[in-house]
Amino acid sequence: MMNGLWKKISRWARQKSPWVLHFNSGGCNGCDIEILDLLTPRYDVERLGIRQESVPRHADILLCTGPVTRQSRDRLHQIYTQMPEPKWVVVVGSCGCSGGVFQGSENVLGGVDQVIPVDLYIPGCPCRPEIIIEGLKKLLENI
């Protein structure tokens, strides 16, 4: 009885108050600027309960931007393994989805899915904050 109640409370808390960790694996920083816009009063994602976190051990969602480079591959995998279960990965921007304009470069391995499993792709170059919010809302509905 208590175990089922605990699962319901835990699921409700994750839906209402996800903590997001942002990781830039390399790129032009266009998507990073749009993610920073989410925290401004104009978009205010905290009204949805979404809070930016700086420690992987406290985060529920890993928000990745940029293509994965040889230098960032190990760090991205390390951050992913430090996050507690259940965890979700959201990729923002064309570069994170497929490598984007950097595809085929010497040090670029491709999209984030080359290193860790991805739950949601939000394409665009760069993605508008409204689209990122819609993507996060859809992810929260599926949790």
Image (cartoon, grey):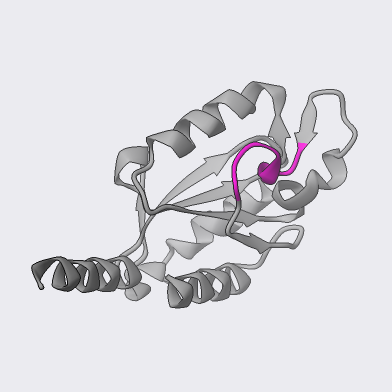
Horizontal side of residue 116 vs 48, given as left or right: right
Residue 14 lies, with reference to residue 56, above or below; the image says: below
Residue at point 64%, 36% (across, down): 115
Q: Quadrant of residue 111?
A: top right
Q: Can residue 129 be seen in this view?
A: yes
Horizontal side of residue 133 vs 105, given as left or right: left
Frontmost residue, 118 versus 4: 4
Residue at point 38%, 54% (across, down): 86
Measured from the top left, where is residue 123 in percent x and y? 73, 62
Horizontal side of residue 33 vs 38, given as left or right: right
The segment highlighted magenta reads 110-117
Q: Can residue 43 be seen in this view?
A: no
Residue at point 68%, 45% (across, down): 113
Extreme-left residue of the structure: 2
Measured from the top left, where is residue 48 in percent x and y? 36, 74
Residue at point 72%, 41% (across, down): 28
Residue 7 lies, with reference to residue 68, above or below; the image says: below
Instruction: Name the image quarter holding the N terminus.
Output: bottom left
Frontmost residue, 105 versus 30: 105
Instruction: Name the image quarter holding the C terminus.
Output: bottom left
Magenta span contains residue 115? yes
Measured from the top left, where is residue 89 in percent x and y? 53, 53
Extreme-right residue of the structure: 104
